[in-house]
Amino acid sequence: MKPTFKKRFKKLILWLVALFIALFVFRFIYGYTKTPDNTSSQAQFFETISSPRKNYASKKYEVKSNTGAQSTIRVDQKYEKIAEIKTKSSTFEDEEKLARKTIEEFDALIQFEQKSGNKGYRRLNLVIGVPPENFDNLYQKLTQIGNIQAKQITKKDKTNEYKELNAKKQSLEKIRNSLIELKSKGGKIEEYMDLENRILEIEQQLQGLGVSLGDFDDENEFCTVQFSLLEGKEIKIGTMQRVKVALEWTIKMYLGIITILLFVTLFGYIFLLAVDKFKILEQIISRKE
């Protein structure tokens, strides 16, 4: 072999070895960073239930007025705050007792509860109403139970919705009062009955608005914690198992890459040969002419 060819061959081997090592290291590290996904086994339970009552809270604060005067505006913000916690534990009964004790400790209420499954595969779903001042502490305590699979906090402003409900209520009350006043003036029986029916419809709408506005009352202020506890053993993967999985993945990926490179090289070589043949053919034709 020529020295130049030997150097190129050694360089190619080194590149191939470096590629294999890089793929193996990448897959091995990824195995440690990627934890088993158990959240898929926990059905999106809280999205399927519909609670007859929603939990809202309020926050009162003052902001400076945009006008030139040295005055402040009092703002009463209404908001909905929901925490979602999904956890897993092999000591289901102990963790359930701890969760219930923690809920009582922070003056929270279990507003919805579902417990299902046989031993070894049990699941507990709780919808908890907690006073706004205790929300953060309860959330922190519940996230220390079991092996957390997923957690998140969502906060939505509901001030405009609250104002719209109040405006709609005031508008309906004005219409009702006008209809009652109109009814007192007398008239035909048919007109009287139509007025009665219309007043009854408005009364029903006002009752529905009253229920919705009741959720915003200061005395009923709560934030929501959706807590899901799943029974199951913690999966521990040994180092040798990770090495085996990483090696198998690397070999498959490496052979795939080499195969693709060989096909690309072969295609390129055939293409270049075809181009050369075409050029030679052109030259022969031009000479004959």
Image (cartoon, rainbow, N blue to C red):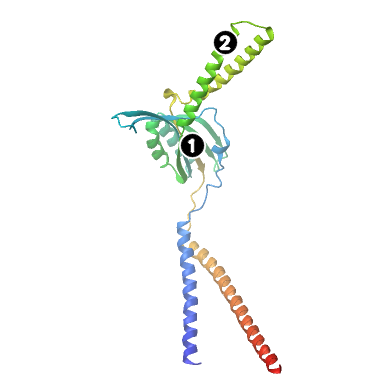
Furthest residue toward left = 70
Q: Mark 2: which secondary structure?
A: helix
Select label 2 or label 1 by which is in front: 2
Q: Amino acid at mark 2?
A: Ile
Q: Position of residue 168 (x, y in %)?
A: 52, 23
Q: Which residue is mark 2?
A: 180
Q: Amino acid at mark 1?
A: Gln
**Image: 257 above or below 269:** above
Closer to the camera, 206 or 196? Answer: 196
The residue at 54%/71% (across/down) is: 254
**Image: 201 above or below 186:** below
Q: Relative to residue 287, is residue 98 drawn left or right?
A: left
Specify whether residue 244 is in view. Answer: yes
Quadrant including the C terminus: bottom right
Q: Mark 1: which secondary structure?
A: strand
**Image: 276 above or below 93:** below
**Image: 57 above or below 89:** above
Specify whether residue 210 is in view. Answer: no
Label 1 crowd (10 A; few <14 / some 14-19 / many >=20): many
The residue at 52%/20% (across/down) is: 171
The residue at 42%/32% (across/down) is: 103
Q: Quadrant of residue 269?
A: bottom right
Dot 2 and dot 1 residues touching (CB under 8 Å): no
Question: Reading the chain from its start, which is encountered first: label 2 or label 1?
Answer: 2
Label 2 crowd (10 A; few <14 / some 14-19 / many >=20): some
Closer to the camera, 218 or 226? Answer: 218
Q: Position of residue 245 (x, y in %)?
A: 52, 63
Q: Position of residue 186 (x, y in %)?
A: 62, 5
Q: Which residue is mark 1?
A: 226
Q: Position of residue 36 (x, y in %)?
A: 51, 53
Closer to the camera, 50 or 203? Answer: 203
